[in-house]
Image: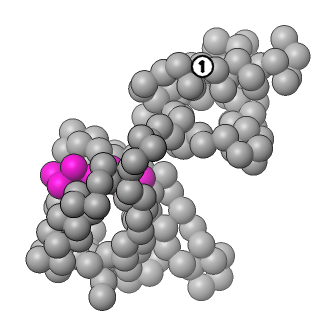
């Protein structure tokens, strides 16, 4: 299969799935190495495709046309991470990513795509199993999230809940 055809089929595969797919599975499907898939995904992203990495694999960003997308700045400890995520998803929001401003590297971003307590639990379990650190560790707990809400009322509820719990950095 030609390279361009493979990339088009990867894109079509992602668009037709409602769940994430790991690079290893795509590599098997297209009979190439995992690294080739990682490169293909990077080039598709560079071409403007809304492909996101999640802890469970790649997927396309699918938002409704009326979704309210906004950013907010939070601060908390590692131990409060799960409570922060629960607060946002319990309000009906999706936590799309986390962003920190590193003094040397500039903006560093990680895709999250967490929209339920189950997904928050899975993220936190993976964090604990991998014995790694959160990006916010680099910035003394201060970080930005891009959030998707179904409407302005949901956005306002999320902000109020985070403020009440002391997670908003203001």
Work out whether 134 lies above or below 148. Answer: below
Is residue 34 at least partly visible in the picture? yes
Screen quadrant of the C terminus: bottom left
What range is drawn magenta here? 89-96
Q: Is residue 24 left or right of residue 127?
A: right
User: Would you name the residue on which mark 1 appears?
Assistant: 13
Screen quadrant of the N terminus: top right
Residue drawn at 17 percent across, 72 percent down: 160
**Image spot of residue 53 (x, y percent):** 53, 42
Residue drawn at 41 percent across, 68 percent down: 71
**Image spot of residue 47 (x, y percent):** 77, 44
Work out whether 44 lies above or below 96. Answer: above
> How many marks on residues?
1
**Image spot of residue 167 (x, y percent):** 22, 76
At mark 1, the secondary structure is helix
Q: Is residue 91 magenta?
A: yes
Q: Is residue 68 magenta?
A: no
Work out whether 45 lies above or below 168. Answer: above
Residue drawn at 85 percent across, 23 percent down: 3
Is residue 158 at least partly visible in the picture? no
């Amino acid at each position: 299969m030609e390279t361009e055809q493979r990339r088009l089929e990867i894109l079509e595969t992602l668009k037709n799935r409602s769940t994430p797919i790991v690079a290893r599975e795509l590599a098997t499907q297209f009979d190439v190495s995992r690294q080739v898939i990682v490169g293909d995904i990077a080039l598709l992203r560079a071409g403007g495709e809304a492909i996101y990495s999640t802890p469970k694999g790649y997927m396309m960003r699918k938002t409704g046309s009326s979704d309210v997308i906004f950013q907010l700045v939070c601060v908390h400890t590692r131990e409060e991470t799960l409570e922060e995520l629960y607060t946002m998803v319990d309000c009906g929001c999706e936590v799309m990513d986390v962003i920190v401003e590193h003094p040397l590297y500039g903006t560093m971003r990680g895709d999250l795509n967490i929209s339920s307590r189950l997904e928050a639990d899975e993220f936190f379990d993976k964090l604990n199993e991998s014995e790694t650190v959160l990006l916010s560790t680099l910035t003394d707990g201060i970080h930005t999230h891009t959030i998707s809400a179904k409407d302005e009322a949901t956005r306002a509820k999320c902000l109020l809940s985070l403020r009440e719990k002391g997670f908003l950095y203001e």
